[in-house]
Image (cartoon, helix red, strand yellow):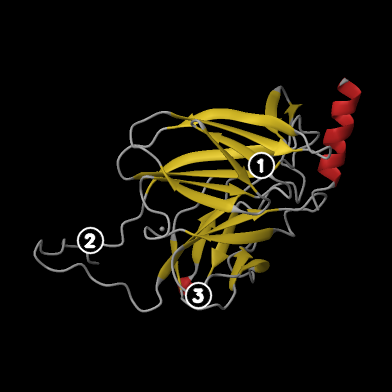
Amino acid sequence: MRTGIIVSITAFLLGFSAGFPLHAQEPAPKPAAGQRFLRLLPLGDPPPFRQEIRDGIRYEIEPEPGTIPPRQVMFGEGEAAVTLRLNLGRATDRIKVPGGLAPLGLRVPGSTPDAVPAPWLAVRPPETGDFLALIWRDPGKPWSQPRAIVFPDGPAEFPAGNIRIINLLPTGTSLMLGTERILLDAGKSLTKQIAIGEDLPLQTAYRDAAGNYQRFYAGSVLLNANERAQVVIYRADGENPRRPAKVVVFNELAPNETKKEPAP
């Protein structure tokens, strides 16, 4: 029986092809035409922790090149360039980006201040609106060859009081959200309003090569006021993972476009 499970999981893995305050009575400033915000969320597993002892002191060994995303990426050029720190499973700060459909180039900072940043990834944005770019690598590929997909991230498309579930697996996922069962196809997402202050059970299961569902996550989601929840299901890319699928779940405050910001 155990051999059959290992064979099914192996086949499944091979199939994974953001002065003085404004006066209280003044209206909130409108955003500049075309202005919106971008966040990045890199997904994957870090390599195993390794260390060595030199002169009686333990030193961490740096991961092999390509096994983790760059520690930092840059958007823009010259003095206007913005640097973002990448951490697996954690969304970056929001940065301002222009409107339109032109690809947004992300570059890896050079080893010296005068070095020209190397290209890393071009994110294809929607025409308007804030958006979140999920970034991952394909099986057998290094982090120097990432892929990305974008989802709306503004308060209109993804407001407070909602949970959004994104299935990045190339196979269907079965979800139990409270007492409701949901089947989410490969590459699809859903956004659903849920009650504030209630602990909502969440379970997920992927469909293996034999067509059977294998549970790989059990937890819960609880929203406070002005919060929303992100659930991203993705392919495990660590060394010999016990399960081929993993989940990132996190709550966050929903952005408020009408919030007043201090003047420079």
- Residue at (88%, 20%) from the top-left corner? 1
User: Residue beneath label 1, please?
Assistant: 173
What amino acid is at disc 2? Answer: Lys
Q: Is residue 26 visible?
A: yes
- Residue at (40%, 40%) from the top-left corner? 194
Q: Between 87 and 221, which is closer to the camera in this rendering?
A: 221
- Residue at (10%, 64%) from the top-left corner? 23
- 1 and 2 marks in contact (CB < 8 Å): no
User: Residue beneath label 2, please?
Assistant: 260
Q: Nearer the viewer, mark 1 or mark 2?
A: 1
Q: Residues within 10 Å of mark 1 (few under 14, many from 20)?
A: many
**CA–CA distance in space, label 3 to label 2:** 25 Å
Q: Nearer the viewer, mark 1 or mark 3?
A: 1
Residue 152 in percent (x, y) is at 48, 61
Q: Residues within 10 Å of mark 2 (few under 14, many from 20)?
A: some
What amino acid is at disc 3? Answer: Glu
Quarter of the image for residue 59 reads: top right
Element type where label 2 sits in the image: loop
Q: Which of marks 3 and 2 is nearer the N terminus?
A: 3
